[in-house]
Image (spheres, rainbow, N blue to C red):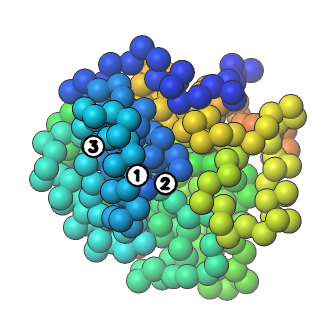
Amino acid sequence: MADYQPEMGSEEAAAGADLTGKTVVVTGGSAGLGVETIRVLAKHGAKVVSVVRDTVKGEAALSKIREGQHDAKVSLIHLDLFDLESVRSGAEQIADLNEKVDILINNAGVMAAPLERTREGLDMHLGTNFLGHFVLTARLIDNLMAAAPARVINLSSSAHRLSPIRFEDPFFEKEEYNKLAAYGQSKTAMVMFSLILDERYRDRGIRSTSVHPGLIETELGRYFTEEEMEFLKGGIPEGVSMKTVSQGAATQVWAACHPDFDSIAAKFCEDCAVADQITNPDENGRGVMPHALDMDAARQLWTMAELWSGESFPD
C-alpha cells in the first residue's frame, strides 16, 4: 500500500527544497491551487511564471504573493488554454523570456462545465484541460530539454474513474453531453499524456508524472450542483475531510520538489505518494484505474491530439 499523506500541506511538502536557479511555469496562476503552488515554490527560491487567462486576477494574486515575499521572483503571462492560438502566442512569450524551463506544472482546468466547443470542435474539458496543455508543452519542449533534467507535472484527478477516453465519440457528437463524463475523460487524458510524454522524452532528460490534488472547495467547482458535489464527496476516503487549498496543492508541490523525481515519473500520484493501481473504482477512495494506464490507448490519444491541434512534438 502507498504511504498516503492526505493531511500534508504545501509548506511541509516543500520542506528542505532549494529551487534557486530553477524556472517554473504554472498554469492557472490566478486562483486556488495555482496561486498556492506559485507562492510556495517562489518562497523556496524558484523563478515562477504564472500563466493566466484573466490578467487582472492573475496580477492581483501575484501582488499578494509579493506582499508576503518581497524578493519573490514571479511574473505573469496571458494565455487562454481554450484558444490554441492564444496558447501558441503565450508559449512563444514564455520561450523567448526564459532560456530554460526546469518544471512545467499544467495545473489549470475547468470542471463539470456546460457544453461549449473549441474552434477544433472539442468540448471545453478535453480542449482546455488536455489539448491546451498538450500544445503548451509542445511549444516549450525545447526549453524543457535545455533545462534537463526537467519535470512536467500534469494535474489529473480521481475523476479519471468516471470515464476512459471515448474514442468512438470523444466530443459528445453522437451521445448526449454528460459533464461528469466529459470532465473524467479529460483527466484520464492527462494521465495518458504524462505516460507518453515520459516515454518519448525520458532519454532526453524530461520526465513527467500526473497528480490528483484531492477534493477542495475552490472556484473550480462552481458548475457543480449540491447533489453533484455530494456525489463527489462520496469518493473521499473514509476518515478524510475535504482538503484545504494548501493540502490540495501539496501533491504537485511535493512532485516539483521531490529529490528523486525518477521514482515518481510515469506514475499517478495523490496524497503525496505514488498511488496504488486498483480495478474497483470504489476501492478505498484512492488509486488509479487500468484504463488510464493503457499505453496503447495513450499512444492513440497522442496521435489524435496531434491531428486535433495540428501540433507535433519533435522526434
Q: Is residue 104 left or right of residue 275?
A: left
Q: Is residue 205 left or right of residue 223?
A: left
User: Mark 1 vs mark 2: which is more N-terminal?
Assistant: 2
Give the Cα separation between the discs numbered 3 and 2: 15 Å
Q: In terms of image quadrants, where is residue 149?
A: top left
Q: Give the vertical position of 248 relative to 228 (above or below).
A: above
Q: Are marks 1 and 2 in contact (CB under 8 Å)?
A: yes
Q: Which residue is mark 1?
A: 61
The amino acid type found where label 1 is placed reads Ala
Q: Are marks 3 and 1 in contact (CB under 8 Å)?
A: no
Q: Which residue is mark 3?
A: 74
- The residue located at (42%, 14%) in the rendering is 16
- The residue located at (28%, 47%) in the rendering is 49
Q: In terms of image quadrants, where is residue 168?
A: bottom right
Give the farthest residue toward the front: 67
Task: Locate residue 262, reporting x and y percent.
Answer: 43, 23
Q: Give the quadrant of the N terminus.
A: top right
The amino acid type found where label 3 is placed reads Val
Q: Which residue is mark 2?
A: 31
- Give the SS element for disc 1: helix
The amino acid type found where label 2 is placed reads Ala
- Give the SS element for disc 2: loop
The foreground one among 299 and 113 is 113
